[in-house]
Structure formats: C-alpha cells, structure tokens
Image (spheres, rainbow, N blue to C red):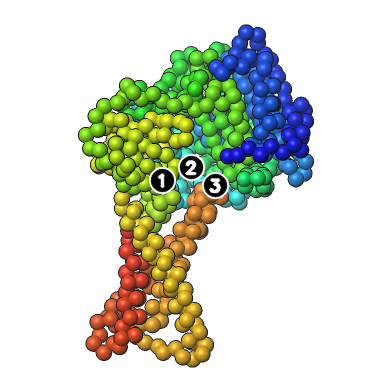
Amino acid sequence: MKKVLKPVACAVCAITVLMTGTAVFAEENKSTPTGIAYDNIGSTIENWASENPSDYSSFVTAVFDGDGIIYQGAFGFADKENNIAATTDSVYEWGSVTKLTVWVSVMQLYEQGRIDLNADIRTYLPEGFLKNLKYDDPITMLNLMNHNAGWGEGTWAMQTADPEQIVSLEEALAQTEPPQIYRPGEVCSYSNWGAALAGYIVERITGQPFADYVHENIFEPLGMEHTSILPDHSDNAWVQEKRKELVSYSYDGSTWNSNGHQLIYINLYPAGAATGTIEDLAIFAQSFVRDDNPLFEKPETRELLLSPSLYLGDTDIVVGCHGLWAEERENASLIGHNGGTNGCSSDLVFDRETGLGTVYMTAGGWPAVSELLFGKMASYDLSSYSGSVTAPGALKGYYAGCRSIRHGIYKAMGLFSMLPLTYNGNNEYSVTSMATLTQVSDNMIILKQEENSYPAYVYKTSDGTTIITLGAQSFASENSLKISLYLLVVMAVISVAGVFMLFYRAISLLTKKHISYSGSLFVALSQICRVACLLPLILLASKYTEQYGLTHTQGYIVFAIEAVCFIIFSISFIMSGMGLIKKDTEGFLRLKYALSVIGNGVSIATILSLELLNIWGV
C-alpha cells in the first residue's frame, strides 16, 4: 500500500511519541537480530511511527527479553474525534492472543497431573456434551492445541453486541458447536470453538469458572492488575470503564474512519476476550522467556509448552508449539500468537534463542515492530525437499478453506474462501492473480507471493480429500462447490429476470390486462422466493463480521424462509411442468411454463447442492 506522508499528522505523531514513549531499561552491548542496539530500540520504533502516520490510527507496543521490559510506548489517538491520545494506560483487546491463557492453564494442570494431553477429552466433559461428531476417534488436548480436532466453523454467533445475550461458557459452547468434518489429527483448521472448549475443560477439572482460574493462577501471580477476560470485562471494573474510551478505525486508502467503540461481547471468551493495558500484556508475554517464571513449578513444563507439537506434514518445518504458532523472519525464528476482534488486532512474538520479544495492540493499523526487530517474513529454501512429481497438473481445481462453514446451505460461505488452482505447466499453478504455487515433489509446494516464498504441503485424508496446508491455513479439494457456484450465478440471473417479470405482472394487474392461468399464483410466488432465498446468504455474510454467525432467532427465521421457498419452488415446478405437457397449452403460455420449470429447477438444484435439507442438523 502506498504510504501517504501528511506533515500535520507527522507533527502530531511526533508530539504523541514524545509524550508516551518510554524506555524502561536498556542494556549496553546487546542488539536485536536486525542489529539495533537495545538502547536504540525505543527511538527506532518512534522514528517509524512518526514517519508512517498513515499506517495506524493508534497502537501501543512493548519490547522485552528475559530480564524485563526494555521499552513501551503509545502512538496516535484512542479517540481521534475527541482528541484523546493513546497512552500506555489505554486498554485494547487481545483477540486470539487470549488463547495463550488457555494453553498456560492446561499446562499448569498437566504439571499437576490433572490433565493427560493424550487422553480423550470426553474423559473431562459431561456425557454426551459433544453432539456433532462425525468420527468415534479420540480427540485429545493436543488436538485442541494443534487445531486439528476436525471442526469447521459453525453457523451460530459466537459474539453479540447485546449484553443481555451473554451466557455462561458451557451454554455458549452448547449453542455454537460446529460439525466435525475431518478425522482428528488429519487436518489443521484453526478453531475458536476448540480453544474455548479447552477453557471449559479447565473449568470442569478445577471446579471454578475459567475467568476465576485465570485471575488466580495467571494474572495475580504476574501482577497483571489491569486486564479482564470476561465478555463484558466485568471481572475488572477499571478495564470495563477504560475500554469505553477506545474507538476503532478502518483505512479507506487515504484516511482512517471511525467504526465507533465496537463494544462486542465474545461468549466464547477463552478464545479471544482478554482486554487490558500494554504493560500487562508485556508482563504476560515476558513470562514465557524469563527464568524465574512464576506460572510453572518445573522448568520442564514451560519447555514442553514451547516445544514443537505440530509440523508441516512429514517435514521438520515447525508449525506450532502447543498452541503457539511458529513464524520465520529473515533474522530470527519466532513463536507466538496474533489476534483480532471487531475493534482491535494484536501480536505477541518472541525469539526463544535470545529471549527478545515484542507485543503490540492496535485499534486500526499495521505496526511494523516485529519487522524492525526481527526482519521481514523469511523466504524458505526448500531445495532439500525437491523430488519428482508423479502427476503433474493433478492439483488443478477448486479448494475451499477448511476453516469455513461446511454444512447446510451456508456451505455457500465456502465460496468466499475458495482457492481456484489453474495449471500453467512445469508444475506451476496460479491462484488467480494473488500468488503462484510450484510443486517441487509429490508432497511439497512453494507458495510465492510478491517477494516471499512459503512452504505448503499436499496430502490426502483417509476419505480421499486432497488437502493443501500452509500451516494453520488449510484448503480442501471441493469441486462440488464449483457446481454450486455456477448454479448460484444462474439463480441470481433468473432472480433478476424474475423481478422484471413481477414488475410486468404488477403493471398488468393495475391496468387490468393480466390474464390468469393455471398455476400463475405459484409462478409469481416462486419469483419472489428466488430473491428471498438469497437473503439468508446475504444476511450471514453481513452479520458474520459483526456477530461471527447468526443469533438463534435470526437462524430460525432464515431456516423458515428457506423451507417455505423450497416448498414453493417444488409446487411451482410441478404445476408448471403439468401445464407444459398439456396438449391444449398455447405457445406463449407454454413459454411461461417452460421458463418457470427452468427457474424453479435451478432453484431446487441450487438449494439441494448446498444441502438445505441438512440444515436442521446444525
């Protein structure tokens, strides 16, 4: 994105830097992997912030190592319209970085012998708690940590803007359980629900709410006094009030526009609801690299937590470490986690070798702190994995994101994460204009995007589905969605034509020129339904950003609409077909019947191809 340097913004940013940037301590003769002396880390970040004001609306950041916090600072405005500058006392949302409290809690219980990472989690759950399982295979805590328990996304909302709709963690999990699509251990598909389930298991074992456990066993031992974790932040009154000051912004290419306060309540709160100051987040992050870690009694527990638990296929390329993700930079190998909510995004990474790490939280923007300290994302050398490709071109086709709704008519949401691969020859594939994939062996792929290249792995599941995995992101061969896509396009065209036909019918009725015929009422109703049947998908697409799904009330209404539409399509199809085969049907009327048969047939086929009849099992 082209950087736009605004002199006024620069001046404001520079003033903000001087007011809020704080060097906590610096050490001589130490430098970052990119060569920045420790005592210059603060000024380097501040210079970047003053030179790139269009890259953020506000952010807070800290740098640490095993000895303590090296630097922390705040930049921009928490509320630009009311001239409220961001400070190190501003609170931001952690998003999915919250999941690290789950994995720390699990490892604490593992250390105490209360959790077996390889035991079936149903051992710790109420009988029959998991209702949407496809396979009888055991699901372990390691599966939850590695996000390969087999779940896709669910239809139901995981968060709400209405505080009256906040429910207990147990109830939230029961309401939002997604279907299990893949056999446990076969496919890595990032799962908020799975992480929240692990938090609930902590509840079940300890006999106390997950939030209480985290405060007692993580926040309090670390002295984190300004962090909450419940959906409405009610576990910390100070945070609850401070959160109301923060405004979220989005960039339109030239300026940052307010999205309001974005006070959204995440019912699956262990997966992403923690909120607090940058100092508290830095203290939490620094606990992973400090020698006197108060969270574990044995050093081996932390070592196990930070050790690799997930690799890219059968390679030695590390993808995850018991819930933390691996990240290769030009100058360092990092592990950590990032996060995003409706209002904020965050990042926590550290270099295990040196203990140096950084965190940031922002309400709009892309702070380059990790790049400053550790370099750009690394390009991988996969020459050691090169080999023969026995079936050149075999990967061409359509792939859908494994982390998408894979059940019922909402399977159409998978169309938004489709990865169409076209074969260019020489073992190279194009992913539209975004990237190229070069297959270097039967299993290994190089993804090239702009200047970077990343490793990917291709394999087949036990049911024959081809999976292309890029670590936490996996895509499954889904050529049936291609048919659904074509049917949806045709249905949309027919729906638009139906609007004009309804308009013509309305004029005919007003001018009293309409001539009724057998089944004409159902033909008109089916034209209305073809438009109405697309509304649920539009509603889900629009509400997914806000609620991460539909509320149950919205879902029931949507299901009722779809069921009525399906019935109308079927009746109209039958009546039009009967009219079409009648011998005394005249030419123009025969054309009407034929168009109705085609329109309703496409609508029925589209709905069936997207499994409408299975939505009742969601």
Q: Is residue 261 found left or right of 111 in the rendered image?
A: right
Observer-side mark, 3 or 1, equals 1
Q: Is residue 308 found left or right of 388 in the rendered image?
A: right
Residue at x 31%, y 50% (from the top left corner): 479
Residue at x 46%, y 82% (from the top left corner): 505
Residue 594 showing in the rendered view: yes
Residue 185 showing in the rendered view: no
Res. 6 image quadrant: top right
Query: Residue type at mark 1?
Result: Thr
Query: Residue type at mark 2?
Result: Glu
> In the figure, 90 relative to 568: above or below?
above
Q: Position of residue 514 (x, y in %)?
A: 44, 88
Res. 82 image quadrant: top right
Report which residue position mark 2 lands on: 170
Q: Position of residue 168 (x, y in %)?
A: 53, 43
Q: Is residue 135 found left or right of 381 in the rendered image?
A: left
Q: Position of residue 607 (x, y in %)?
A: 36, 62
Q: Position of residue 344 (x, y in %)?
A: 61, 39
> In the figure, 483 relative to 102: above or below?
below
Residue at x 55%, y 39% (from the top left corner): 340
| Circle nearer the N terminus (2, 1) | 2
Secondary structure under badge 2? helix
Report which residue position mark 1 lands on: 432
Comparing 88 with 135, the one in front is 88
Comparing 180 with 582, the one in front is 582
Distance Cα–Cα, label 3 vs label 1: 33 Å
Which label is found at residue 159? 3
Res. 150 image quadrant: top left
> In the figure, 6 relative to 386: above or below?
below
